[in-house]
Image (tube, rainbow, N blue to C red):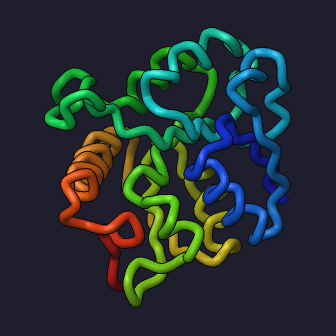
Amino acid sequence: MTTFTIIGTGNMANAIGGVLADGGSSVTYVAKDEVGTAPLAGDVVVLAVPFPAVDAILAAYGSAFDGKVVVDITNPLNFETFDSLVVPAGSSATAEIQAKIPAATVLKAFNTTFAATLASKRVGELTTTVLVAGDSSEAKATLISAIEAGGLDGIDAGSLARAHELEAIGFAQLTLAVGEKLPWTGGFAVAR
């Protein structure tokens, strides 16, 4: 059984935690006011927070991330204008996080899903699919196994470099939802 610590207690944190718990994983949460004091007990740590909160979390825990798998769910977009990503062209939030905690294994996942589609496990008539990118095949397989045990589909989307494209998909999906062209209960789906 994989153990997870989810940093965050919002809609995405609870939806992800629900899926993982449904699959038999042990899940603990760290609330905003507990960051830096609550332990990172899980083998896998999920950063279920907005991108602007990440740097403070990385600073608060420092070497506590060493040896852990860290899952970045963020979409690093400009939340004031919703017209651009705030990471350098060709990079990703995930790559920036990996550079700041090099002794951890960082994955990108859950950023192309909405909380409602994780909780319902459906996007329209299809099972919700979580795309996972990262450089460790073992870490990706562990996360995908936990996702699938919880009733979702998981796909290995490639190396850490693919986080850039996943963030572009997440950006497009969020801007469509904010513009009310896509419901928060919908989103992009993968048919296989």
Residue 74 position within the rendered picture, expressed as x and y whole percent measured from the top left: 43, 38
**Is 33 on the left-hand or right-hand side of 98?**
right
Residue 143 position within the rendered picture, expressed as x and y whole percent measured from the top left: 62, 56
Is residue 173 depicted above or below 45 in this figure? below
Is residue 180 depicted above or below 82 in this figure? below
**Is 189 on the left-hand or right-hand side of 81?**
right
Residue 29 position within the rendered picture, expressed as x and y whole percent measured from the top left: 77, 41
User: Dividing the picture into quarters, in which one does residue 47 lie?
Assistant: top right
Identify the image quadrant of the C terminus.
bottom left
Instruction: Count numbered badges in the picture.
Output: 0
Is residue 42 depicted above or below 19 in this figure? above
The residue lying toward the viewer, choosing from 82 and 150, is 82
User: Dividing the picture into quarters, in which one does residue 190 lie?
Assistant: bottom left
Residue 130 position within the rendered picture, expressed as x and y whole percent measured from the top left: 47, 63
Name of the residue lying farthest toward the bottom: 125
Residue ID at (68%, 72%): 150
Identify the image quadrant of the N terminus.
bottom right
Residue ID at (75%, 70%): 23
The residue lying toward the viewer, choosing from 35 and 191, is 35
**Is 85 on the left-hand or right-hand side of 144?**
left
Name of the residue lying farthest toward the front: 180
Residue ID at (55%, 19%): 102
Residue ID at (26%, 51%): 178
